[in-house]
Amino acid sequence: MTDYGDFLRAAVAAARAGAAHIRGAERPAPSAWDLKGAADFVSKPISMSQLMVRLENVCSIRHLRKENVRLQEELEKRYSFSKIVGKSKQMQQLFDLIKVVASSDASVLIHGESGTGKEMVANAIHYNSRRRKGPYVRVSCTALPETLIESELFGSEKGAFTGASQRRIGRFEASNGGTLFLDEIGELPLPFQVKLLRVLQERQIERLGSNSPIDVDVRILSASLRPLEEEIADGRFREDLYFRVNTVAIHVPPLRDRREDVALLAQTFLQEFVKDGDKEIAGFSDEVLYLFDTYPWPGNVRELRNVVERAVLFCRGSRITVEELPAPLRGVAGTQPEDTIRAEFTGSTGARGSAGAALPPLESSAARQSLTSPALHAQTAKLQPVTRIALRPASRCLHGYQYPRCSYQPAQDSYTLACLTTDPAE
């Protein structure tokens, strides 16, 4: 019995070293035993083989947690700036630009597609500026009713309009000494744009129902989904206001133009959701990473984040596979087995909408015809040393957003797919 006790004590010590405990039948109450949490348990009588398996699992979990922490620290140190993640050249240039404009009080206009992270850029500018200890007020211009825009931004006096039972401080006053972020500034109605222009010029506001000017010290950051130059041409935005808010312009690139950031962003989101969901997921399968790299991401970073969150929710293994992805991404893979997505076409440059990927020489007319006929993909795959999956993303070019053209390159002795923005039949 003494040997058994010594063995058990040694096992418990080993498990504790692995950041876990082994709970036996005669252990103290859970409240006292589980101060650091229990990773697993065994029951008496103890089987040596079962105990070794449990200990190996605990050690693996501990190693996985340490690796996750290390990767997260590496991500934050190397590729992030105020929670904006990216290692591509475009994002590194964006980080440098944020640092420059953050050191001044210049008005900044941030433009980019929906879901690219314009608000995060505005956040980074404020929290890295000298105004970071001051208030930071965000205003969604699309959410403000046209009849209430002036009172919301400039404030109102008691009795200024029906229902104004007390004085109200506007967003400009609330952000005095700090930063005011006007999201979707292009949605402001033209009559109010004149008043906003005067406030930006004079640095004074007047509450609705009052004639007394109030000095404000506010830095203006604004964002727009649509190019304001087009809004000016269409008569929906004032040119003089545009020049007032556009001292510095920052463009946030879409995710499809910085594909080297997709896997990095996906891993960052995975770390976040695994921590919140208390799951042990090591990463993504090769097939998932391939699909991430070839998908056009029309919803940009926001869509990628939602995809990873969904995958973590449904994942039951140690890695996220194609089965956990939503239908649009699974559609890129088609109905082929996952292991056919790897192999010959992991480079996937043909699906990126630029120059296309060089395929092996297409010796027959049937092979060339298949580039514009998905029904013949399987036949071509039999004729050529590439998989059907390899042909599909190249010929579909961004999941149906562009059309393929095949051209022969004598120097490389190969046919190359080039993406067109219009139907070649037109």
Image: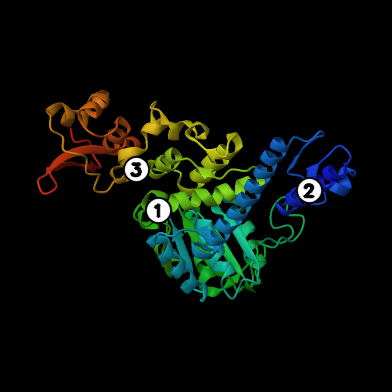
* Amino acid tagged 3: Thr
Mark 1 and mark 3 in contact? Answer it, CB < 8 Å: no
Q: Residues within 10 Å of mark 3 (few under 14, many from 20)?
A: some
Residue in the image at 62% along x and 43% along y: 280
Residue of label 1: 260
- Which comes before the other along the chain, label 1 or label 2? 2
Distance between mark 2 and mark 3 Cα atoms: 46 Å
Distance between mark 1 and mark 2 Cα atoms: 45 Å
* Amino acid tagged 1: Glu
Residue 281 figure quarter: top right
Could you tell me which secondary element the residue under label 3 belongs to? loop
| Residue 118 relative to residue 39: left or right | left
Residue of label 3: 346
**Which is more foreground, mark 2 or mark 3?**
2
Could you tell me which secondary element the residue under label 2 belongs to? helix
**Which is more foreground, mark 1 or mark 2?**
2
Residue 23 vs 203, above or below: the answer is above
Mark 2 and mark 3 in contact? Answer it, CB < 8 Å: no
Residue of label 2: 12
